[in-house]
Amino acid sequence: MNPKSIEGRRSISPLQQLTLTSSRELFRNAKTIIAMLFMFFFFLLIIGGINVAINDSRVAPNVSVTGATQQAQDLVAKLNAQGVVAVSGAPEGSTTAQVTLSGDSADVILSTPHPPAWIPLVNTVHSVTGIPTSKITVADADGSPEVDLLRVNLSTVLIAGLMAIAFMGTSVPVVALRQRGTLRLLGTTPVSRLTFIVSQTPVRFALGVGEGVIILGIAISQGYIESVNALQLAVTFVLGLAMLFAFAYLLGSRAKNTDLITQITGILPVIMLLTSGTVLPPGIYPPFVSTAINFIPSTWFMQAMSSQLAGTEPFVSIDLLWALMAVVGVFVALLAARVFKWDQGDL
C-alpha cells in the first residue's frame, strides 16, 4: 500500500472518520431517509392543499378605503391599476371588503357569507402604506378573524420536519447501533462519547438546512417576509436545531429497544406541535396549561421562528428565547454525553 495513502488516513481525526462513516451509513438506509423527510413533506402538502382549497376559490374583492386621505388615495389607485374595483370613502352596496387605515395599523372587514380573496389585498395594503402585515387585522362582518393558514403554519411545518430529523433520524439509529453491538466496539477505542455524539450531527444538520431553504423560499415567494433579517433567522435556526439534536442524543443515550424508541420518536413531535401554540391557539387551554406550555423548549423554537416567518409576537423577547435555547441546548448535550452508554450492559 502506498505510504502516502496510509499517512493520509492517519491524519484524519476520529471525529472526521466517524462523521464520514455516519454519513455513509445514513444514506445507505433508504427507510431512515424516508422516515426523516416524510413528516416535513406530508405537513407541507397538507397545509398547502388546504390553503389552495380555501383561497383559490374566492373572487376578487370590491374595496372601499377609509382613513388617512393620501394613503387611501394611493391605495385606491394601486388597486384599480391591478384590476380590483376600489373607491375612497364609506362602503357601498357592492362593497365586499372595507379597508380602514389608522396610521401604523389597518383593519380589513370582509363581507359574509362568502368573503372575497383577501391575501392579495393585504399584500397591496402593505406595499402601498408600509404597514407590517402583522398589524393588518382581517375579519369578517361577524368579527371572526381570517387566517392565512400557509403563513402561520410555515414554522410549524419546518420544525415538524426538523424534529423528525433530530429524533427519528438520530435517536433511532444510535439505539440500533447499540443493539447491534457496534457501539460496544467503539467503546474499546479512544473515541470519547462526546466525539461520537458530535459526529452524528453534520449530515443531519445539512438535511435540516435543506428543509429550511425550502420554507424560506416559499416565504419569500409568497411575500411573507417583509424585511429579511438573515442573521436573526440564522441564529434562531442554528440554536433551535442544535437544541433538538441535544434532546435527541439524550433520548438515545441509554435506550436499548429500537422499536420502543421508534414509537416514542413518532409520537413526540406530534405532542410538541400540539403544545407549541401555533397549531392550536393557547387560548383553548386553561391558564395554568398555557403557562406550562411556555416552559417547553420546543415552544421557544416555535415562537422565535414564527415571529420571523409569520410576523407573530412571541410571549417573551427573541433575545431571551435565544438565551434559553442556547443554555438548555448546551446543558442537555453535556448531560447526554455524561450518561451515554456504549453497550446495553455497561454502567
Image: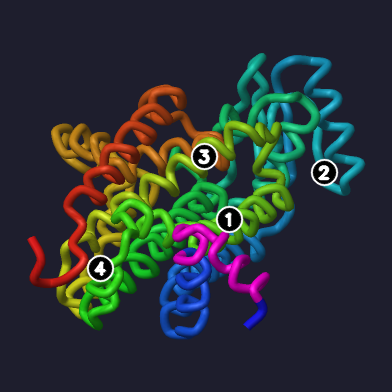
Q: CA gap, disc 2 to disc 3? A: 20 Å
Q: Earlier in the sequence, mark 2 or mark 1?
A: 2
- Mark 4 vs mark 3: in front: 4
Q: CA gap, disc 2 to disc 1? A: 43 Å
Residue found at the far front of this picture: 3
Q: Which mark is residue 188?
A: 4
Q: CA gap, disc 4 to disc 3? A: 65 Å
Determine crowd level at label 1: few under 14, some 14-19, many 20+ residues with C-alpha closer than 10 A: some
Q: At which x and y percent is residue 49?
A: 56, 69
Please give the name of the residue rendered at 66% of the width and 32% of the height, measured from the top-left corner: 229
Determine crowd level at label 2: few under 14, some 14-19, many 20+ residues with C-alpha closer than 10 A: some
Task: Please give the residue where the numbered disc 3 appears in the rendered image.
Answer: 139
Please give the name of the residue rendered at 16% of the width and 67% of the height, measured from the top-left corner: 255
> Camera-side residue: 298 or 244?
244
Amino acid type of the residue tagged 4 in the rendering: Thr
Amino acid type of the residue tagged 1 in the rendering: Val
Task: Please give the residue where the numbered disc 2 appears in the rendered image.
Answer: 85
- Mark 4 vs mark 2: in front: 4
> Camera-side residue: 274 or 163?
163
Quarter-wise, where is residue 169 in the image?
Answer: bottom left
Amino acid type of the residue tagged 3 in the rendering: Ala
Q: Earlier in the sequence, mark 1 or mark 4?
A: 4
What secondary structure is found at the residue carrying circle 1? helix
